[in-house]
Amino acid sequence: MSEVSNPVANRFESGATLTHESASAALAAGLQRIAAGANGVDCAPLAQFDSSALAVLIAWQRAAQARRAPFEIVNLPAGLASLAQAYGVDTLLSARH
């Protein structure tokens, strides 16, 4: 009997803040989670962010792709989605609002 993995259980939360000041630590923490098998990030708690958040999300996604693993960004705040669109990187994110 094989176990069916639950993709939701393999997501980690972004945290409430993802700005220039916290980007390096958030990037490192997320990369560790991805290396351990995380397949997505839930951005629901994300309340304070700047363009650094986009760089971190893209880096996480690319790290998962390098491992040939799926990676899903869920609950992306509308403001961050708008910022991604303004910078022209929205097509790089596999994000759901």
Image (cartoon, grey):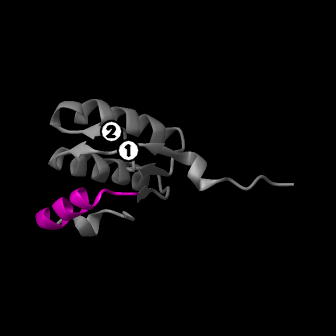
The circle drawn on residue 45 is 1
Taking the magenta stretch, the answer to whether it contains residue 79 is yes
Taking the magenta stretch, the answer to whether it contains residue 3 is no
Going 87% across and 54% down the picture, which residue do you hit? 1
For the C terminus, the quadrant is bottom left
In this view, the residue in front, 30 or 80, is 80
- Residue 8 to residue 35: above or below: below
State the SS at label 1: loop
Image label count: 2
Position in image of residue 33 (x %, y %): 47, 38
| Residue type marked 2 | Ala
Q: Tell me if label 1 and label 2 are in contact, CB under 8 Å.
A: yes
Position in image of residue 52 (x %, y %): 18, 45
For marks 1 and 2, the one nearer the N-term is 2
Going 32% across and 39% down the picture, which residue do you hit? 16
In this view, the residue in front, 70 or 25, is 25
Which residue is label 2 attached to? 16
| Residue type marked 1 | Pro
Which portion, as a residue range, is magenta? 75-87
Going 39% across and 65% down the picture, which residue do you hit? 96
